[in-house]
Amino acid sequence: MGSDWPVCLLASEYAQWFDLLDRYAEKLTEHERDQFCGETAIRVYHLNNENTQGRP
């Protein structure tokens, strides 16, 4: 979550945006939350846990 950072900081603090997205994600299924929170990026950019584990 937060692919629009730092643009989102023009209107609000990051914590407020994160809270908004977190509340939105509450109504999603577990699978949808996983996709929303990063699985889509992992799939699209061909990332895997071996290459990204422990990195910011």
Image (cartoon, grey):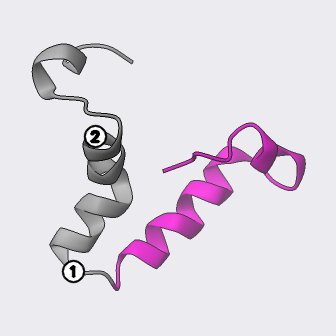
Give the residue at mark 1.
Answer: 29
The x and y percentages for residue 3 are: 58, 45
**Image quadrant of residue 28?**
bottom left
Q: Secondary structure under badge 1?
A: loop
Q: Which residues are magenta?
A: 1-27
Residue at 25 percent of width and 45 percent of height: 43
- In the displayed structure, 9 sits above or below 51; it is below
- Is residue 13 located in the magenta-colored stretch of the structure? yes
Residue drawn at x 80%, y 44% as measured from the top left: 7
Q: Secondary structure at mark 2?
A: helix
What kind of residue is marked 2?
Answer: Ile
- The image position of residue 29, as x and y in percent, is 21, 80
* Residue 24 belongs to the span the image colors magenta: yes
Find residue 52 and report its horizontal and vertical position in percent.
24, 19
Q: Nearer the viewer, mark 1 or mark 2?
A: 2
Q: Residue at x 19, y 18 (%)?
A: 53
Quadrant containing the C terminus in the rendered view = top left
Is the residue 52 above or below the residue 47 in the image?
above
Name the residue beneath numbered marker 2.
Answer: 42
Q: Horizontal placement of 3 versus 55: left or right?
A: right
Picture coordinates of residue 4, whole percent (x, y): 67, 47
